[in-house]
Image (cartoon, grey):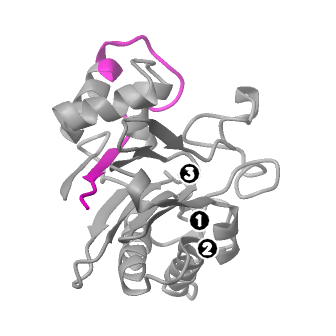
Amino acid sequence: MRTELVSEPGDPGRPNEDFASVGLPASGQGGSLVVLDGVTPPRDGGGCLHSVPWFTARLGGALTELTVSRPDVPLAELLSLAIARTAGSHASTCDLSHPRTPQATVALARWSPASVEYLVLSDSALLVESPGGTVTALLDDRLDRIPRSALATDALVDSTLRNKEGGFFTAAADPSVASRAVTGSLPRTEVRALAALTDGATRWVDRFHQGTWPDCLTLIRKEGAHALVQHVRTLERTGPPRRGKTHDDATVIYTELTR
């Protein structure tokens, strides 16, 4: 199995709020990948004493352990358990009811000899390539369906839209949000490779329009995950000014599955 993992902060002077991991069970049967994109909080800190990297490290760590240690439990249930575990670690010190309590987007995949399961919540992306080369983008497009006029900026979305019906959902402190994720399963024989990307990396497709999702996966396979991030950074520096963050944390995991 070939695996690449790249995660680069948007600003070297700020901590990276993304999380990424690949889990391989001791049995050697299957594995999992976890990608989280932490949501940058408002200046008031969102009612929590802890940083977004603190939150994504704990949620991501819980997901990595659970996806490997509990292979028979569906991914949505595991996400619910991981959210509850993370919330329990700071419920006594922080206001978890605040709409901007630390939270993250989620992309998960878990494979076994028989199947490949997936889960996507909010605007991270999971790309699946078939043995014949067909690429399918597994996306949660609820944020894209919200009119731009309703959004303050890419980094600060009105609290009436976050984790609300008619808006979009992220992993924060409510375990029930896991039921809102896009989930499914594919036969292992139908999957040759997977790529999980935070929105700092998907910009190559959805912000700068340099190619399609299949083009993006081809670039990663041929040039490497780091090359995709560097292409994005070049476009951010040389392109016209755009709304939202000029540079964002960018994370890519690429995995080729072998039989």
In this rendering, position of residue 205 left or right of residue 142: left
Q: Quadrant of residue 32?
A: bottom left
Residue visible at 43% across and 19% down? 208
Q: Quadrant of residue 169?
A: bottom right
Q: Which residue is mark 1?
A: 101
Question: Can residue 227 be spotted in the picture?
Answer: yes
Is 4 or 124 nearer to us in this picture?
Answer: 4
The image position of residue 88, as x and y in percent, is 54, 87
Q: Give the residue type at disc 2.
A: Ala
Instruction: Label 3: state its secondary structure.
Output: loop
**Is residue 234 shown above or below 171?**
above
Res. 42 mark: 3
Question: Can residue 52 be spotted in the picture?
Answer: no
Res. 173 mark: 2
In this rendering, position of residue 100 left or right of residue 199: right
Range of the magenta residues?
235-259
Residue visible at 22% across and 78% down? 28
In this rendering, position of residue 92 left or right of residue 129: right
Q: Give the residue type at disc 1.
A: Thr
Q: Give the residue type at disc 3.
A: Pro
Q: Residues within 10 Å of mark 3 (few under 14, many from 20)?
A: few
Q: Quadrant of residue 69?
A: bottom left
Using the numbered discs, state the Cα–Cα distance from disc 1 to disc 2 in whole angstroms.
8 Å
Q: In the rendered view of the protein, which quadrant contains the C terminus?
A: bottom left
Instruction: Label 1: state its secondary structure.
Output: loop
